[in-house]
Amino acid sequence: TVKLLEVEHLKTSFKTEEGIIPSVRGVSFTVNRGETFAIVGESGSGKSVTSLSIMGLVRAPGKVEGEIHFEGKNLLELSKKEMRRLRGNEISMIFQEPMSSLNPVFKIGNQIREVIVQHRKVSKAEAHRLGIEMLERVGIPDAAKVAGNYPHQLSGGMRQRVMIAMALACRPKLLIADEPTTALDVTIQAQILKLIAELSEQENTGIILITHDLGVVAEMADRVAVMYAGEVVEEASVFDLFEKPGHPYTLGLLGSLPTLTEQRDRLDSIPGTVPNMLNMPEGCPFHPRCPYAEEQCKTERPELRVKEADHRVRCLRMEEISH
Ligand code: SF4
Ligand code: MG
């Protein structure tokens, strides 16, 4: 395995009128070439802020600390210009909101053609043809006609697909997909995930897949990090995560958390909400929601510890809870 991206002790915080929000609190992980690494968590867990930090898209008063190495270069030390060159070239991102990455004044076909011309040695005519083919591959019907449209003439779902086509057309080494298919219907969703998986396979692209959907994780990912309140609480291979989950929060996401009231035999969601980041609870951030919480959990902060090879868990009671 060849390391593509190494994130070390990433801390991203935002200054607000009410105080500093520590959205990402010391996150470390590695993405290898050709690997799909999923980051799972509820909204507010810090997964989107992690991806924006990697892309260099956190704006002041947001502050990013730590190290983000991409093929050996620390991205946090690059100039704005160097970072801009890397984005949409070697690293590309599929956002939840597609409008932001499409230029409203150019036709779809011209935009995708320009991306292709920049990244492959082909003529304009050939790039145009490849662009239409890419639009077809992301499930756009009548792609030749759509190529002649402006972004505002398309529905949200169509724009999302165009953006995905553009992100894939630049043949990035790293693709960050933040909830790439949540807005799309199930058939298109499956089609696009398949396309992303093919890309990873054929071009050895590393993928960071950000999602709250464990079905997508099971289908797509090689390894997975579960985030809670700005921290990684569990990291494992997909197989281990589903077969031998170690953190109570992961158990909750998998629907296998025992309840305090014995009457209920199954819990679909974890009661309670993500903690207020302006006022983090003492001890383990998960303790107000955790059915395993004990006195020590209210005061002691758990570290990420090795459960077994390539499997780490941030829980004081890991040994007692997981087997
Ligand atoms: Fe639950 Fe305690 Fe483990 Fe936190 S440290 S997840 S509160 S058992
Ligand atoms: Mg998000």
Image: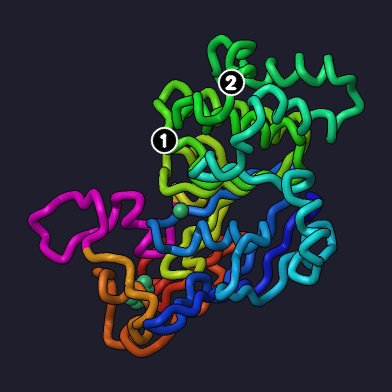
Query: In the rendered view of the protein, which quadrant contains the C terminus?
Result: bottom left
Q: In this orientation, which residue lies closer to the viewer: 289 or 155?
A: 155
Give the magenta range.
244-271
Single out the mark in the foreground, 2 or 1.
2
Question: Would you say the residues marked 2 and 1 are in contact, meaning their CB atoms lie under 8 Å apart?
Answer: no
Report which residue position mark 1 lands on. 183
Query: Does 101 sit above or below residue 319?
Result: above
- Residue 28, label in figure: none
* Relative depth, front residue between 271 and 181: 181
Q: Residue type at mark 2: give it.
A: Asn
Instruction: Indicate the quadrant where residue 41 lies.
Output: bottom left
Residue 293 sits inside the magenta stretch: no
Q: Main secondary structure of the magenta part?
A: loop
Q: How many marks?
A: 2
**SS type, badge 2:** loop
Q: Which residue is located at x 15 percent, y 50 percent?
A: 265
Q: Is residue 239 visible?
A: no
* Side of 45 relative to 109 (left or right): left
* Residue found 84% across the figure and 35% down from its top: 118
Q: Position of residue 266 (x, y in %)?
A: 19, 49
Residue at screen point 52% across, 71% down: 24
Q: Which percent across, then down, holds residue 217? A: 49, 42
Which residue occupies the extreme bottom position in the image? 299
Q: Which amino acid does label 1 sit on?
A: Ala
Alpha-carbon distance for marks 2 and 1? 21 Å
Who comes first in sequence, dot 2 or dot 1? 2
Q: Is residue 20 left or right of residue 79?
A: left
Which residue was labeled with disc 2? 149
Q: In which quarter of the image is ligand 1?
A: bottom left
Q: Residues within 10 Å of mark 1 (few under 14, many from 20)?
A: some
Visible residue check, residue 166: yes
